[in-house]
Image (spheres, grey):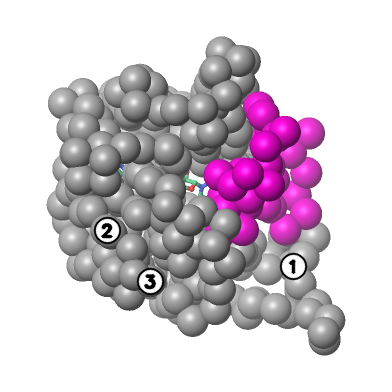
Amino acid sequence: MALNDPRHLYPKISPPRQTQKDPGLDQKLEPQADIGLDSYVGRGRLEGRKALITGGDSGIGSAVAVAYAREGADVAISYLPEEQADADRVIAAIEEAGRKALALPGDLCDLEQCQHIVAKTVEEFGGLDILVNNASRQLWHDGLENIPEDDFDRVMKSNIYSSFRVTKAALAHLEPGSSIIFTSSIQAYDPSDTLLDYAMTKAAMNNLAKGLAQQLAPEGIRVNSVIPGPIWTPLQPSHGQPQEKIESFGQNTPLGRAGQPAELAGAYVFLASDEASYVVGESLSVTGGKLAP
Ligand code: NAD
Ligand code: MG
């Protein structure tokens, strides 16, 4: 088999200046992100599993949804109502893979919505064995003093509260062999001065994964997290980064380019599958070489 150079396997992008209202849409990204629609090949590694992915409409979550369905899982995705167009594409891809899809629009800042997405998934699929806490909000600000109180509140609720509440609602349904995965970030280890509130939520999610792993391993449930580096998704141009950082986004990694959502899918499939049976409380970096110490 021919060798593929990871520096060039995906394009080195220099996105034009662009801005979207948050949450951004994959459909409006320039250039388009690669969520694996044309490339991901399943090998039956999650046959018959039932997965719920928050923020599964776009970016990393959408690549994981496509991969999970092609690996044989039924997949529910939660997202904000204004992201319906992105969600429709992912739902279609899950169904094309021959699996059941479930669309769960709604705001995870609300406790009831966190409980609803779990209850509905269990009702429609007859259970839940993979939970991916991936939804998050990221807005940059120039210093702590410029983070408005209501922005701070919404970031905490979208990232930390939602992960905590969705997981709490899921616990009663998870049987031995189930897996919970949190999407943390390189920001949990190496925070940017423009992302102080966001970075602290990513550290909290990583910490919750490690603590919960200790609680649930004796019950046969594995908990882990993924640590993405700079990945080209709608989070970035919808006030996730200052404009000047968009144009060279990800080029300061050792691989010299931003990652694509498709490059994350393998990590999430691995952590959910029996191949990771002895992997518990791990933070798996997919960062293009940026070190998460
Ligand atoms: P994305 O915008 O495609 O995905 C984030 C999703 O979060 C949105 O699609 C939205 O559906 C969901 N969301 C946010 N607030 C919500 C709320 N209140 N209620 C319901 N859903 C809500 O961007 P992405 O980059 O793929 O982000 C996915 C995860 O990856 C996030 O946890 C993010 O922190 C993490 N991450 C991304 C990067 C990166 O460079 N893109 C790096 C490290 C970590
Ligand atoms: Mg989205």
- Residue extent of the magenta highlight: 264-293
Q: Give the numbered dot on residue 68.
A: none
- Counting the numbered discs, the total is 3
Residue that label 2 marks: 101
- The residues tagged by marks 2 and 3 sit, at their Cα atoms, a distance apart of 10 Å
Disc 3 or disc 1, which is closer to the eye?
Answer: 3
Does residue 283 lie above or below 37 as drawn? above
Q: Is residue 250 left or right of residue 181?
A: right
Q: Nearer the viewer, residue 112 or 238?
A: 112
The local crowd at label 3, few if under 14, some if 14 to 19, many if 20 or more residues have their Cα within 10 Å, is some
The local secondary structure at tag 3 comes to loop
The answer to whether the residue bearing label 3 lies less than 8 angstroms from the nearest atom of ligand 1 is no
Quarter assignment of residue 224: top right
**Does the magenta segment cover residue 282?**
yes
Residue that label 3 marks: 97
Residue 235 shows in the view:
no
Q: Earlier in the sequence, mark 3 or mark 1?
A: 3
